[in-house]
């Protein structure tokens, strides 16, 4: 059976393509979902694609990933920079996670440079727009194929 990658999107990412295209691009979150599903199929993976504006819902989904998902691709949005709860959920889940951001968080306001997610993620991809999700799926696939154990 194909391995499942839980693709999680945090607060305000449902607004993609609607506002601030100069920062986040013109594609909608539905476009990103289709991109992930198409690329996952090429990799022989299944994608479970979700978005929430609620921190606790993301925490619950990460907890549930233990035993139900083989990898996590996470764009936690602004919660990246604030949420110890998401960090703790990632550490507890023990599912390999890759962090992704559409924008280059290192070229923006100083507060975006710090990521709690980074303390639990295997790595981070940022600054490549929606293509970053494709790169992150490749990274998860590589982890699962070549280095399944931390
Ligand atoms: O670059 C990213 O992917 C971010 O995770 C996006 C977050 C931001 O807080 C992080 O620092 C970096 C913001 C997501 C909000 O997305 C919007 C998209 C279109 C219009 C309004 C918000």
Image (tube, rainbow, N blue to C red):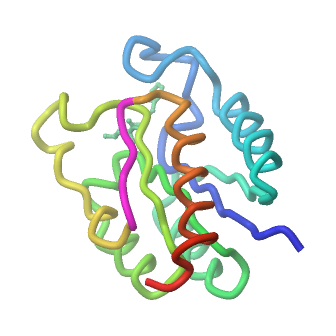
Determine which quarter of the picture holds residue 37: top right
Residue at (42%, 16%) from the top-left corner? Answer: 20
Task: Left or right? Give the position of 144 relative to 25.
Answer: right
Location of residue 97 in the rendering, given as x and y in whole percent from the top left corner: 48, 67
From what the image shows, is residue 7 above or below residue 39?
Answer: below
Location of residue 2 in the rendering, given as x and y in whole percent from the top left corner: 84, 68
Instruction: Please identify the quadrant where the C terminus is shown.
Output: bottom left
Principal secondary structure, stretch drawn in magenta: strand
Location of residue 55 in the rendering, given as x and y in whole percent from the top left corner: 46, 62
Quadrant of the displayed image that contains ligand 1: top left
Determine which quarter of the picture holds residue 122: bottom left
Residue at (72%, 39%) from the top-left corner? Answer: 33
Q: Which residues are magenta?
A: 122-127
Tag count: 0
* Residue extending farthest front: 146
Q: Is residue 113 magenta?
A: no
Residue at (58%, 53%) from the top-left corner? Answer: 52
Residue at (57%, 19%) from the top-left corner? Answer: 17
From what the image shows, is residue 31 above or below residue 76?
Answer: above
Instruction: Please identify the quadrant where the N terminus is shown.
Output: bottom right
Task: Left or right? Give the position of 86 relative to 3.
Answer: left
């Amino acid at each position: 059976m194909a391995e499942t990658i839980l693709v999680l999107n945090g607060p305000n990412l449902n607004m993609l393509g609607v506002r601030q295209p100069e920062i986040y691009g013109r594609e909608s979150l539905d476009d990103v979902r289709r991109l992930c599903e198409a690329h996952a199929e090429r990799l022989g993976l299944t994608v479970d694609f979700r978005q929430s504006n609620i921190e606790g819902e993301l925490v619950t989904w990460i907890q549930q990933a233990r035993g139900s998902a083989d990898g996590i691709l996470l764009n936690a949005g602004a919660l990246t920079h604030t949420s110890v709860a998401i960090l703790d959920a990632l550490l507890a889940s023990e599912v390999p996670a890759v962090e992704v951001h559409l924008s280059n968080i290192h070229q923006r306001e100083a507060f975006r440079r710090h990521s709690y997610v980074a303390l639990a993620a295997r790595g981070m991809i940022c600054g490549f727009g929606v293509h970053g999700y494709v790169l992150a799926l490749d990274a998860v696939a590589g982890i699962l194929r070549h280095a399944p154990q931390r």
